Image (tube, rainbow, N blue to C red):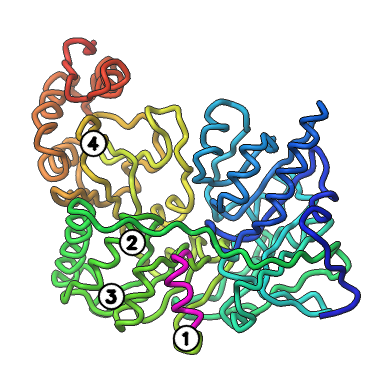
């Protein structure tokens, strides 16, 4: 540490930030994102609002964050615009009400968009670190996100020195920023464990206006216990991949896996580890969750490359108590590298992500409820899906106690088109859509993935469709959505009420 750096309070740090400033944060999910400075910034906004003064800032993050960031600032009505992904209830309500302008972006493209000036330049970068030196070399904590890009572009940098994370995290990061076009070279990653950058993030020490000390733990929520539905989805995924391996459609040595965020993803990875037909595997993914660490302890996951350690505090402490065991098994990268489409294609990843809803032709909605209300965002699912060896989407066949079918005639919002979605899996079965026409995809999905109580309804929809390459009835294709909006139950749908 250097006497040239000034230690300040969170309130002093927030006092440098003014109305209409653009602020960018480290981290990826609730892992590694700042906590005390954004909370102080929210209080600063509330004080201005009490005085009848405007105070809103623009925000860029790596992905979602903890409640101390997105939640606090949303409740304080302190946000003008937000990108690229969120998962906080208060934030979601504010952006769906129009209070916050929200730009939903593929996570891999945000750093490039920042560098090229496609979006607003951040004035402040706030980074969570566990150590630093007088030369401006910092060690990030559990999430990297967009830290390299924002620390280079920002005019000012504030460090949150978080003592909840040990300095011994040094060596777990691989910090690398791509060249700008044209004629840039490939990113030289040829297997998941390759390292190409530095273990520290180098920033201009002259930009650092203060260091705020804290010991706040990451706000990663624990995972819900595996239920019958998520367990069956996981088993179906595992059995399908084991079958593909046996048929020679997957190389005998297997390929790296990518898995999305959340309870279903965590459960299905556990199922993959338990399946004797699947060899020990590597992961090249965004988030490293609890199940990955458990499988690593069992020797079922050989290596995991990600952007963040999005694990429960209990599991994080297990890692911290045995860092030497994990040192050659984990690496944390910037999201521009963890989610890079070129690397995804080169490594031949199998991508596994969760759908909010899917339609009978294989189009997937990852983001919007009833077409208009944002849930979280597209995140990195598009980065992986389009470029994978093959893509898998999973979803429970129904939600809301069976009142909503997750499989519909046409998705109310399209994030991943039928051209990118290769396999759809629910608790009822698997629809392998590769090489199929729209008619064939519809038959496979209805027969294998739809809940029994909705099968006849969807077969009946096909009967009223106009003939064509893709059968459709323009009046009825959103009939199930419209019925839910009207009565609260898709099962009440009668096609004659909507058909053209």
Which numbered disc, 4 or 3, marks the residue that appears first in the sequence? 3
Residue at numbered disc 2: 266
Image quadrant in which you'd find residue 46: top right
**Can you tell which of label 4 and label 3 is closer to the viewer?**
4
Near-viewer residue (427 or 253) = 427
Judged by its main secondary structure, the magenta piece is helix
Give the Cα separation between the discs numbered 4 and 1.
44 Å
Image quadrant in which you'd find residue 261: bottom left
Residue 230 at x, y percent in the picture: 23, 54
Residue density around tag 3, few if under 14, some if 14–19, many if 20 or more, within 10 Å: some
Res. 254 mark: 3
Q: Range of the magenta residues?
A: 310-322
| Residue 484 vertical position relative to residue 355 in the rendered view, above or below | above
What residue is at 72 percent from the left and 64 percent from the top? 160
**Can you tell which of label 2 and label 4 is closer to the viewer?**
2
What residue is at 69 percent from the left and 35 percent from the top? 80
The secondary element bearing badge 4 is classed as strand
**Can you tell which of label 3 and label 1 is closer to the viewer?**
1
Residue at numbered disc 1: 322
Residue density around tag 2, few if under 14, some if 14–19, many if 20 or more, within 10 Å: many
Residue at numbered disc 4: 407
Q: Is residue 25 left or right of residue 225?
A: right
Residue 77 at x, y percent in the picture: 67, 34
Q: Is residue 14 left or right of residue 277?
A: right
Which numbered disc, 1 or 2, marks the residue that appears first in the sequence? 2
Q: Is residue 466 magenta?
A: no
Q: Is residue 493 left or right of residue 102?
A: left
The secondary element bearing badge 2 is classed as helix
């Amino acid at each position: 540490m250097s006497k040239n750096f000034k230690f300040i309070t969170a309130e002093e740090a927030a006092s440098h930030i003014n109305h209409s400033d653009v602020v960018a944060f480290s981290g990826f999910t609730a892992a590694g994102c700042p906590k005390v400075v954004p909370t102080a910034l929210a209080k600063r906004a509330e004080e201005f609002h009490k005085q009848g003064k405007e105070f809103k800032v623009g925000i860029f993050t790596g992905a979602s964050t903890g409640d101390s960031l997105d939640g606090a600032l949303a409740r304080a009505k302190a946000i003008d615009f937000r990108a690229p992904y969120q998962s906080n209830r208060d934030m979601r309500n504010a952006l769906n009400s129009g209070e916050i302008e929200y730009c939903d972006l593929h996570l891999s493209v945000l750093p490039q968009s920042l560098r090229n000036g496609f979006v607003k330049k951040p004035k402040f970068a706030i980074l969570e670190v566990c150590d630093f030196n007088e030369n401006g070399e910092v060690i990030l904590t559990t999430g990297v996100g967009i830290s390299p890009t924002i620390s280079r572009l920002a005019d000012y940098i504030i460090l949150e020195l978080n003592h909840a994370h040990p300095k011994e995290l040094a060596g777990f990061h691989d910090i690398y920023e791509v060249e700008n076009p044209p004629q840039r070279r490939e990113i030289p990653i040829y297997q998941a464990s390759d390292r190409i950058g530095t273990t520290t993030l180098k920033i201009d020490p002259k930009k650092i206006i203060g260091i705020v000390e804290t010991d706040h733990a990451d706000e990663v929520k624990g995972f819900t216990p595996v239920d019958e539905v998520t367990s069956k989805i996981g088993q179906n995924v595992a059995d399908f991949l084991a079958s593909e391996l046996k048929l020679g459609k997957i190389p005998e040595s297997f390929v790296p896996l990518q898995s999305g965020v959340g309870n279903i993803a965590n459960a299905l990875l556990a199922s993959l580890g338990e399946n004797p037909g699947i060899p020990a595997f590597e992961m090249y993914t965004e988030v490293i969750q609890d199940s990955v660490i458990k499988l690593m302890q069992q020797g079922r996951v050989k290596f995991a490359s990600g952007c963040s350690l999005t694990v429960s505090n209990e599991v994080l402490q297990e890692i911290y108590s045995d860092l030497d065991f994990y040192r050659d098994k984990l690496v944390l990268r910037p999201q521009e590298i963890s989610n890079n489409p070129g690397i995804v294609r080169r490594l031949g990843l199998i991508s596994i992500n969760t759908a909010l809803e899917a339609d009978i032709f294989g189009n997937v909605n990852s983001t919007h409820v009833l077409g208009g209300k944002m849930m979280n965002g597209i995140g990195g699912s598009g980065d992986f899906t389009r470029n994978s060896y093959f893509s898998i989407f999973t979803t429970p066949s129904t939600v809301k106690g069976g009142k909503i079918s997750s499989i519909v005639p046409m998705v109310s919002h399209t994030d991943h088109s039928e051209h990118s979605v290769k396999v759809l899996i629910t608790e009822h079965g698997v629809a392998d859509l590769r090489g199929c026409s729209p008619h064939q995809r519809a038959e496979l999905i209805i027969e294998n993935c739809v809940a029994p109580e909705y099968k006849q309804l969807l077969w009946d929809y096909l009967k009223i469709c106009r003939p064509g390459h893709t059968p459709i009835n323009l009046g009825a294709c959103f009939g199930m959505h419209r019925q839910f909006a009207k009565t609260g139950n898709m099962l009440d749908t009668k096609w004659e009420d909507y058909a053209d």
